[in-house]
Amino acid sequence: MKNILLLICAFFCLNAFSQTIELEDFADGFSSPLALKNAGDERLFVVEQGGVIKIVDINGTVNPTPFLDIQSIVNAGGERGLLGLAFHPEYQTNGRFFVHYSNSSGDTQISEFSVSTSNPDIADPNSEVMLLTVSQPFSNHNGGTIAFGPQDGYLYIGLGDGGGGGDTNNNAQNPTLLIGKLLRIDIDTQSGGNNYGIPSDNPFIVDPNTRDEIWATGLRNPFRFTMDPETNSIWIGDVGQNAREEVNRASLSQAGLNYGWRCYEGNAPYNTSGCPDESELTFPVFDYSWNGGGSVIGGYVYRGDLYSDLQDVYVFGDIDGMISTLDIDDNYINQGQFPGTWVGFGQDINKELYVVNLGGSIFKIVGGVLSVDENQGADAIIYPNPANDIVSIKLQTQVMEHLKISDIKGSILYAETLQSNQKKLNTSSFAKGMYFITITTKQGAKFVKKLMIK
């Protein structure tokens, strides 16, 4: 676990314009976990490669009963398995979620499942609706991530080039194939005999020689990509061949992009025979040299409240244990090697970040500068502070809508939704030390205040 004294020192000493990342133990005991998702509440859902999804609460406690177990239909091993999970934007009311897995033939299967009508912590394993099956010529480069666009509500699917090495058949540039592409489908409609529809603004629907589902081309293996709702953009970690790893970023208003594989590996030419003009390609915002054993693992732009030095910063990693950041100007910082085999990043309901270790554990990402400003939230009165047993929180001119208290490690100890300008809390069970009160008002303001318990 973290050295708390170091974190307190970071709070008072570090420059807010640089990023410092440390990892904090969160949960362990998983079998080859690959991904971590939230469904719009405080639960976290851990995807295991073998075909199981487990629920973890905000304190790292794992539910004894899995949310979903489809091991009997998942072909797992190597780069195959249960690879991705996405919850419908209206999951809290319709209970629909989507998975990306390798079927018994080793092909990609995108399917829909539904939560049980009697227990919100258990899905119905018999509710599968198969949406899309894609033939995979090899066992590697299957992609893995599926995610909903933050504004359009469509499902995006990342698929690798079909595997092997060097994309010898040039699949990623072949418009008649879905592999090596980023797909975009409408899971709320049906058309053409499929259990999904094609969005009317997909870029190639007027081209009879290109599959309608394609949103972007030229990807080698976009194993992990994420959406940034604040900027309506997509970040893609595209695994390289044997020289360069790359990070791509694009606005989701930009349709029909070609990310360049196999013509280019990162920013370097790879096989430019018969390729489009360079001006027609979209190059990565960052690439780096392959170290002989790693693969880029795409992450998230930090949008949480706790760490001011991580605001607007893209946090990503490499399977070899490296964690890195890109700031808003694409300045790169290698945060160092950590003891883990990183295969995915996750985000909780409060937009705090986690990283998934294939070895069976999950860590919380901790920044270097806590987001506490004594001049922030002058409307709030917290008394007594320091407190013993009871603390009163009062807003002078606004109404509280959400209130939470977290400790210095970021663990949430108390959370409530309310419609009031004041609240009294019993803090007698809290240990002595420093805590943080985060208030979101009905008027849309948000601020963080320090609370001392003596």
Image (cartoon, grey):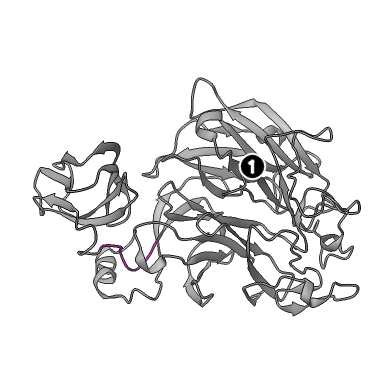
Residue located at (53% from left, 54% from top)? 229
Name the residue nearer the viewer: 205 or 25: 205
Judge whether 267 appears above or below 453 on screen.
Answer: below
Classify mark 1: residues with Cα within 10 Å, few (<14), some (14-19) or many (20+).
Answer: many
Residue located at (91% from left, 51% from top)? 208
Q: Position of residue 127 (x, y in %)?
A: 66, 26
Per the image, label 1 sits on a secondary structure element best described as: loop
Q: Given the image, on which type of amino acid does mark 1 rest?
A: Gly
Name the residue nearer the viewer: 450 or 324: 450
Judge whether 65 appears above or below 208 on screen.
Answer: above
| 367 drawn magenta | yes
In which image quadrant can residue 25 be found? bottom left
Q: Is residue 293 visible?
A: no
Q: Position of residue 157 (x, y in %)?
A: 69, 49
| 408 drawn magenta | no
Q: Position of residue 247 (x, y in %)?
A: 62, 68
- The residue beneath circle 1 is 50
Q: Is residue 374 left or right of residue 334?
A: left
Name the residue nearer the viewer: 369 or 23: 369
Residue located at (40% from left, 56% from top)? 304
Please state the total of marks drawn on the protein image.
1
Q: Is residue 138 left or right of residue 370?
A: right
In which image quadrant can residue 240 be found? bottom right
Q: Quadrant of the N terminus?
A: bottom left
Magenta residues (range): 366-372
Q: Is residue 112 visible?
A: yes
Q: Position of residue 243 (x, y in %)?
A: 71, 76
Helix, strand or loop: magenta stretch: loop
